[in-house]
Image (cartoon, helix red, strand yellow):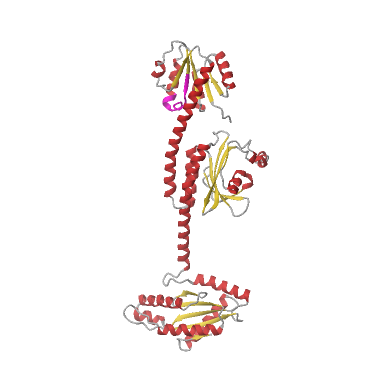
């Protein structure tokens, strides 16, 4: 891909075409020639040019008419034009077609003056295009940032980024690659060229620019990967792959989340596109800087929502203490710890006596209030290492790590007396409440696992109830 100014030279004069083409190429210009109005139109519609040089001989008004039509359609509105004309050429004929952004040189003309005017037009054209690009970039940037900051989900933000930046820069390939836990791998979370991609693992050995950006934490921009030494190792593999390499220029822009390099914003162009440039990089950097703020916020919201969902899944909704699922996880951990370190652990299964009578006499709302008050009482009786859960109805279980039979009996006696002496109330009147407890201590030949321990505690609870309630058995 040539980076030299690209000129379209339109003339019917073969000698002039040959001479001017040679002079212009010697001065660093890439020259495309055309003869005839139809070929001129085809050239202009096929690809853009930095400058048009139009040779108008007498009677060539047709060319001007065609150019005026193209100008109105927008094909040449941003392209400076230099008209070569014979002496006596009426400049008004150019203005009549609405082509005011042209410069007319009348024969005879000197090569030095011609080159000087070309340079001036190219300079003005570049400045004009840059100003237009910056204005367009600012408008697109504002629109992108508005959409990004309105999104509350990280995956949605990644999709917005690749879509809007690819469209804004008019490139075909734009993706977000997150650093993976496994060294040498990355995870593509969004790709403009394939919107269906989600969490695709890729071998970063094929992408040295991403590896370098993640390693250094700095941006990597390469205008031509065919020549850049960064690709020396992988360049030899390109011909061996089923899909030939079509990438020509890349930007790998690393971004940080929570103080660490989280991933790379990856932009690529093909041989058919203009190479990425510093203006493109500046645009992408402005987008990603604001996107990082939005991503931090989105991840925070996701974690808070996840924590709330986990809490809802782990908590008994009536009493606010852990539920049976969490108890089973916790007691399994405690049994593993007891086996590993040759320790003991006891569970106390506590059940309200005659709870059906409380509900029948006072109503279910009072029964619910008693359950809440009992849960609060049990929590106050715990040591830091102890754990209480509601595992169903009026049944609670307390895990007592590093507590054997003697300590568990003292604990159960104290707790049952506290329950019996506590002033449970329906809001106006006291509600008398007692409870019974069944204890089970690990290790025990009858309780080798969680299921066995619960079964033993339940049997001891039944014995306590059968013995008259408001007592414990072990």
Left or right: residue 361 versus residue 407 is left
Look at the picture and state if 184 lies above or below 440: above
Q: Is residue 414 magenta?
A: no
Give how far across and how far down residue 305 sits, in percent. Answer: 45, 59
Q: Which residues are the magenta region?
A: 70-82
Quadrant of res 220: top right
Q: Residue at x 40, y 80 (%)?
A: 356
Left or right: residue 238 versus residue 131 is right
Quadrant of res 1: top right
Give how far across and how far down residue 65 sits, in percent. Answer: 43, 19
Give how far across and how far down residue 16 sits, in percent. Answer: 55, 14
Give how far across and how far down residue 272 sits, in percent. Answer: 56, 33
State whether residue 461 appears in this view: no
State whether residue 165 appears in this view: yes
Q: Residue at x 43, y 28 (%)?
A: 74
**Nearer to us in this view, 134 or 393:** 134
Left or right: residue 341 versus residue 366 is right
Q: Residue at x 50, y 25 (%)?
A: 122
């Amino acid at each position: 891909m040539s980076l030299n100014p690209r000129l379209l030279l339109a003339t019917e004069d073969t000698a002039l075409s040959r001479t001017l083409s040679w002079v212009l190429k010697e001065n660093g210009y890439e020259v495309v020639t055309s003869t005839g109005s139809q070929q001129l139109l085809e050239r202009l519609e096929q690809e853009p040019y930095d400058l048009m040089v139009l040779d108008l001989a007498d009677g060539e008004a047709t060319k001007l008419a065609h150019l005026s039509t193209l100008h109105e359609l927008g094909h040449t509105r941003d392209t400076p034009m230099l008209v070569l004309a014979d002496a006596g050429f009426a400049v008004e004929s150019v203005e009549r077609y609405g082509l005011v952004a042209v410069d007319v040189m009348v024969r005879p003309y000197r090569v030095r003056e011609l080159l000087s005017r070309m340079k001036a037009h190219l300079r003005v054209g570049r400045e004009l295009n840059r100003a237009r690009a910056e204005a367009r970039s600012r408008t697109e940037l504002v629109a992108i940032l508005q959409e990004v900051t309105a999104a509350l989900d990280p995956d949605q933000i990644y999709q917005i980024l690749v879509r809007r930046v690819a469209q804004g820069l008019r490139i075909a390939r734009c993706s977000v690659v997150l650093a993976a836990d496994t060294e040498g791998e990355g995870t593509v979370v969004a790709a403009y060229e394939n919107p269906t991609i989600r969490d695709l693992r890729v071998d970063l050995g094929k992408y040295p620019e991403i590896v370098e950006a993640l390693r250094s934490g700095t941006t990597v921009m390469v205008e031509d990967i065919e020549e850049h030494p960064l690709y020396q190792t992988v360049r030899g593999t390109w011909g061996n792959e089923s899909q030939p390499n079509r990438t020509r220029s890349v930007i790998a822009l690393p971004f940080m989340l929570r103080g660490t390099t989280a991933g790379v914003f990856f932009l690529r162009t093909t041989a058919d596109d203009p190479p990425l440039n510093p203006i493109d990089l500046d645009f992408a950097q402005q987008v990603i800087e604001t996107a990082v703020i939005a991503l931090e916020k989105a991840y925070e919201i996701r974690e808070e929502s996840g924590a709330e969902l986990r809490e809802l899944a782990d908590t008994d909704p009536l009493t606010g203490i852990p539920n049976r699922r969490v108890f089973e996880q916790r007691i399994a951990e405690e049994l593993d710890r007891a086996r590993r370190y040759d320790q003991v652990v006891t569970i106390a299964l506590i059940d309200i006596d005659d709870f059906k009578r409380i509900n029948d006499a006072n109503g279910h709302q009072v029964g619910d209030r008693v359950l809440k008050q009992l849960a609060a009482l049990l929590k106050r009786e715990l040591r830091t290492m102890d754990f209480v859960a509601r595992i169903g109805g009026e049944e609670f279980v307390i895990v007592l790590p590093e507590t054997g039979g003697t300590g568990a009996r003292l604990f159960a006696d104290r707790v049952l007396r506290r329950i019996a002496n506590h002033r449970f109330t329906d809001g106006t009147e006291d509600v008398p409440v007692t409870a019974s407890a069944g204890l089970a201590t690990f290790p025990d030949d009858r309780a080798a696992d969680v299921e066995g321990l619960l079964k033993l505690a339940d049997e001891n609870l039944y014995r306590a109830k059968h013995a008259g309630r408001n007592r414990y058995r072990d």
